[in-house]
Amino acid sequence: MKLLRVGTAGAEKPALLDADGVLRDLSGVVDDIDGALLADDEALERVRSAGAGGGLPVLDAAGLRVGPPVARIGKVVCIGLNYHDHARETGAEPPAEPVIFFKAADTVVGPNDTVLVPRGSVKTDWEVELAVVIGRTARYVESAEAALGHVAGYAVAHDVSEREFQIERGGTWDKGKNCETFNPLGPWLVTADEVADPQDLSLRLWVNGELKQDGTTAEQIFPVGEVVRYVSQFMTLYPGDVINTGTPAGVALGQPEPKPFLRAGDVVELEIEGLGRQRQELKDA
């Protein structure tokens, strides 16, 4: 299933994109798309049956805002330097274990919402990423194979980053990762049964129409199952939590000087095979 949430920010309602690409209203079946729904197999089956039956009301997608596909996200866990090609372009050694950092849940916005360049920023960067959405509580999971059974689905994430704040201002990476609007998510939550192999997905990102990132999840140093297993050794993952699993080569940080960091007026578009497409215009905060 392709689940999404539509409407004005803070007042989104649940929806489903059916097999024919028709947007359907789910608000008569479930209250929202959140961790509680993703952990409820019976509720998900009601959604699946309603979608297959073709009787859900049709929504007019014209002019309708798409919000983040998951509500009330508990935490956004991020994996740094998780692509071989990205490590090479930045001159970093591939990590021996996954690098973990966090984004606050309030950085999450809709896939086509405005991204704000922070005040004083000179090094705002782009990063297309595969997002994993947890559907079953994951605590000390024993194997990567078992970890995949805790995944509700997948989405496109844009891990927007401010590199000066992240690298040059002291402390951890968090200052460059938690600026407002720095995690567009969606358009859809695609349930795990529709993603045959999360290690065989193409990822692309364009800036002002120019292709910047053109990668594949096959380049991940730590694949999805291992990421979920590993993270569960250090924290409990709950339904509705999100993991951003890293970015492939092609970020501004890895390019020759003068590095083409983002500015107000730029347009970023990104997509992951089968998971949909995002588009953001940048403005000054």
Image (cartoon, rainbow, N blue to C red):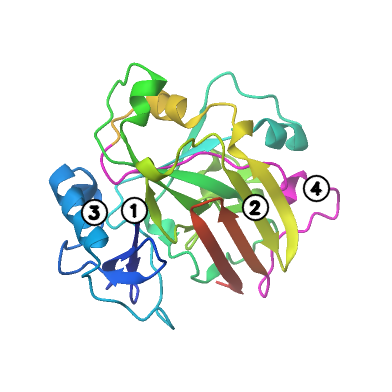
Whether residue 221 is visible, yes or no, is yes
The image's mark for residue 204 is: 2
> Residue placed at 26% from the left, 57% from the top?
33
* Marks 4 and 2, how far apart at CA: 16 Å
Magenta stretch: dominant secondary structure = loop
Residue 199: give x, y in percent of width and height.
54, 34
Residue 94 sits above or below residue 62 on the image: above
Question: Callout 4: helix, strand or loop?
Answer: loop
> Residue placed at 40% from the left, 65% from the top?
20
Q: Earlier in the sequence, mark 4 or mark 2?
A: 2
Q: Earlier in the sequence, mark 4 or mark 3?
A: 3
Magenta-span inclusion, residue 261: yes
The image's mark for residue 48 is: 3
Magenta-span inclusion, residue 112: no
State left or right for residue 217 relative to residue 239: right
| Magenta range | 238-266
* Marks 1 and 2, how far apart at CA: 22 Å
State left or right for residue 6 relative to residue 165: left
Residue 128: give x, y in percent of width and height.
59, 50
Residue 262: give x, y in percent of width and height.
69, 63
The image's mark for residue 1 is: 1
Residue 160 sits above or below residue 130 on the image: below
